[in-house]
């Protein structure tokens, strides 16, 4: 591990509070430099509460990175920015992440498999029509993930690989509640149909309480900058 380790989740203000970065602290030397970036720091701890080697900054991933951070980092980590990818094409984001890395540095990009999500019920007698309708509206068409490994290899990276993680059904309700929170924000900011969306959310949550859940595998790409 070099002296610059860097998680980044710019472009989405919805769900992050620097948790990945702070969790990393216990796994790296105290001399490591850790910088976190997001489009908004509203959910992050105030700077006086952070360790001295952790710094948080505002940055929009669609902008060029600040000059002080170009080719500085050994590791760049980004996650859960599916909703901000434009025109089903991650290359503009990937280009700016590439600029942050030193040659030979590693990118880790985590996403939910929004195309491969499905609804699971504890028994066939449990109705799932409302939660399936909610998932259909939330899922979108994110088939850029199908070719992401190749996209990495064609845009300045090598040794690209995709790892897929399925979680236990014991955790299904926990993750489903996360997706429902995402739905609430998505309905408000994207669909802009507050009355219909609120009713669908209420009806879907009732089916969740009866024993159903949205299941979304996790996708992780890892690649090295050439």
Image: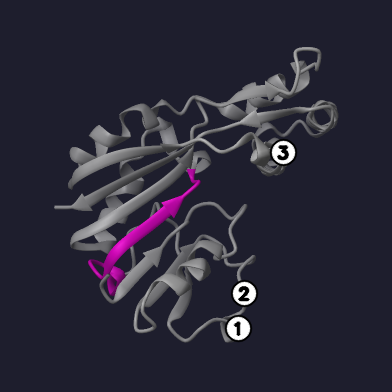
Residue sitting at x 74%, y 23%: 122
Q: What residue occupies the far top of the structure in this picture?
A: 124
- Residue 81 is left or right of residue 29, and the answer is right
Separation of marks 3 and 2 at Cα, in angstroms: 27 Å
Circle 2 SS class: loop
Whether residue 64 is visible: yes
Separation of marks 2 and 1 at Cα, in angstroms: 6 Å
Q: Residues within 10 Å of mark 2 (few under 14, many from 20)?
A: few
Which residues are the magenta region? 67-81
Task: Kindly identify which numbered label has been placed on residue 33.
Answer: none
Tell which tag, 3 or 1, sits nearer the viewer.
3
Percent of width and height locating residue 188: 72, 40
Circle 3 SS class: helix
Residue sitting at x 47%, y 56%: 9
Answer whether residue 111 is magenta in the image: no
Which label's residue is closer to the chain start, 3 or 1? 1
Residue with the mark numbered 1: 49
Percent of width and height locating residue 116: 50, 25
Disc 3 + disc 1, Cβ < 8 Å: no
Whether residue 186 is visible: no
Q: Quadrant of residue 27?
A: bottom left
Residue with the mark numbered 3: 173
Residue sitting at x 25%, y 62%: 101
Disc 2 + disc 1, Cβ < 8 Å: yes
Residue with the mark numbered 2: 45
Tell which tag, 3 or 2, sits nearer the viewer.
3
């Amino acid at each position: 591990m070099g002296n610059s380790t860097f998680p980044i989740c710019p472009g989405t203000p919805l769900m992050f509070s620097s948790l990945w970065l702070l969790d990393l602290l216990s796994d790296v030397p105290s001399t490591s430099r850790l910088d976190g970036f997001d489009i908004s720091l509203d959910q992050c701890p105030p700077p006086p509460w952070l360790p001295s080697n952790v710094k948080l900054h505002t940055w929009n991933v669609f902008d060029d990175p600040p000059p002080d951070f170009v080719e500085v980092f050994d590791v760049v980590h980004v996650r859960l920015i599916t909703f901000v990818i434009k025109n089903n094409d991650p290359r503009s984001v990937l280009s700016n992440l590439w600029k942050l890395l030193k040659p030979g540095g590693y990118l880790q990009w985590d996403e939910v498999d929004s195309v491969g999500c499905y609804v699971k019920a504890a028994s066939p007698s449990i109705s799932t029509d409302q939660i399936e309708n909610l998932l259909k509206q939330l899922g979108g068409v994110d088939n850029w993930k199908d070719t992401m490994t190749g996209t990495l290899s064609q845009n300045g990276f090598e040794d690209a690989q995709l790892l897929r993680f399925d979680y236990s059904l014991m955790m299904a309700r926990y993750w489903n509640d996360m997706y429902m929170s995402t739905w609430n924000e998505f309905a408000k900011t994207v669909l802009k149909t507050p009355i219909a969306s609120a009713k669908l959310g209420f009806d879907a949550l009732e089916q969740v309480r009866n024993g159903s859940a949205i299941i979304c595998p996790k996708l992780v790409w890892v690649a090295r900058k050439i």
